Amino acid sequence: MKIISTKTVNSIARQTAEVVRDIIPARVSETLTELPRFSSPEMVMARTLNKIAIKGTKAQKVFNYPKATPQDLKRLTSNTLKDSYSRVTWTNPKDGKNYHILKESILPDGNIAIRVLNEDGSFLKNASIKPKNIIVIDDFGQNKMSIYGISHGEIVTAFLRRNNPFVQIETINTGLADTMNPEFFEPFKQILQRIKSGEKIDYISCSKGAICYSTGKNMRGKVPQFQPITDVADSGTRVLFASGNSIDNPTGTANQVLLLADKIEGVGSLSPQTHKLSNFSSSRNSFFTQHYEVGEHYIRPTEYGANITGLPGTDIVINNPKYKQEVENNILIGKNKERVDKLLEKIKAEIKEVQQKRVGLMRGRIDFNELRKLEQRQNTLEQRRVKLVRLMGSTSLENGKYEATEKFFGTSFSTPIRTAKLALNDMMEGIL
C-alpha cells in the first residue's frame, strides 16, 4: 500500500486536515471502545473470519487427502497455474469445517459447476455457484512495486484470485493517484453510474491510501471528497480498503478519515509469526478496521513459477533476471536454518572422510584411478561447501528461515484476501 509524506499531500488533503482539526484535535487511542458501525450480521461474520484467520496463523493446516480419487488428488496437489487457479479450500464460517472446491466448467448461464470435497478429499457433492463481481482499483501501470518487475495491482489481484478463483474480476488502473487525489475518485463516480443503470457490482477491493489521521467518529458529509465512495457503498456494493501501513506510528491509520465514512470497511494485517496484528498494521480496533487477514508473505519458487500467497501451488510467472538469480537459483529459499546447518556439517564430514581415504591410499600401493576419483569427489564437495557458505552469507535469515530479498508485507495483501473470502461465503450460501 502506498504511503505518502504529509509534505506531499495535495490541496484536498489539506482541506481534509482542516476539517479534521475542527472536529477533534486528539490522536487516535488504541483503547477506543465505541461500538462498531456495522450491522450485527456483518460484524459477526467479520469476527468469525478473523478468528479463522488467527487460528490459521497458529497452526497452518496441511492436507493429505487420503480419500481423494486419483483424478481429484492430482488436481489438489498439482502446482501448475491451471490447477492452482481452479481450486480453493474453503472454511465454512458456520461450522469451521474445511472443504475443497474444484472448478469443473463454466455453464451456459455463466454460473460455475463445482465439485465439493470433504477435508479428507472424499467426494461430497456437485453443485453450481454464481460468480460475484469484484472490481480491483489499484496501480497497474509502469511504476513497478516489486523489485522483480511486477506492478502492485498484479500482485494484489493474484492474492484475490488465488483465494477465490471463481469470481469475476475487473481491474481499474488509477496509477499513482492516492486516496486524496481527485483522479482517484473518478472511477467511483463511473461505477456509481453503472450501478444506477442496473449493473450488479458486489465488491470493490482497494489497497491504496494516503496519510490522513483523525479521531472523529462520523465523517459522513464532513469530507465531501469521499462522497462518490460512500455513495457506492450506499448502493449495496461492499467497499473494502486497506487500513494502511504506519510503521513509525502504528496507533494511527493512513486511511483513517476514509475508514470513518459510514459503510467503508477496513482491513488490517495479521502476523503469521506472532499470531497477532502485524507491527505495521495501522488500525487496532473494530471501529476503524473490521477485518484482519495475514499480510506478511514471502516469495518461494515452484517448478512452474513463483508462489507469493502461501497457498499451495503457483501464483505468478516472473520472467526477471534478478528473480531467477535470487530465488530460482537459490537452494536456500524457504529452508530452515537448522536444516541448512546440518547440510553444511554433512558436507564437511564427507570432505574429511574423503581426505582420510586419500591419506590411507597414499600409505600403500597407490591406485591412481581411485586417487583421481577421490580428488574429483573432494573438489565437488568443496565447490558445494563454498556455494552453500556464500548463499548463507548473502541470503537474509528471518524467523529461522532463509528468505528472498522480495517480501510482500502490508495491509495491501490482507484486503484482497478478505474480499475474496467474503465473496466465496456469499457464493457458497445454500450449497452446504
Image (cartoon, rainbow, N blue to C red):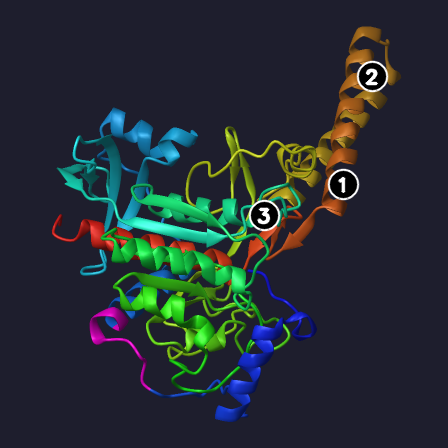
Q: Which residues are magenta?
A: 35-43
Horizontal side, residue 390 vs residue 280: left or right: right
Who is closer to the viewer here, 134 or 345? Answer: 134
The residue to which callout 2 is attached is 361
Q: CA distance from mark 3 to mark 2?
A: 38 Å
Q: Residue at x 48, y 86 (%)?
A: 215
Label 2 crowding class (10 Å Cα cut-off): few <14, some 14-19, many 20+?
Answer: some
The residue to which callout 1 is attached is 389
Q: Mark 1 or mark 2: which is in front?
A: 1
Horizontal side, residue 11 vs residue 169: left or right: right
Residue 415 percent across, percent down from the top left? 43, 59
Who is closer to the viewer here, 89 or 174? Answer: 174
Who is closer to the viewer here, 285 or 55? Answer: 285
Q: CA distance from mark 1 to mark 2?
A: 29 Å
Quadrant of residue 151 within the rendered picture: top right
- Tag 2, which secondary structure? helix
Q: Residue at x 39, y 76 (%)?
A: 261
Label 1 crowding class (10 Å Cα cut-off): few <14, some 14-19, many 20+?
Answer: some
The amino acid type found where label 3 is placed reads: Asn
- Tag 1, which secondary structure? helix
Residue 338 percent across, percent down from the top left? 61, 48
- Mark 1 or mark 3: whose residue is earlier in sequence: 3
The residue to which callout 3 is attached is 336
From what the image shows, is residue 255 above or below residue 196? below
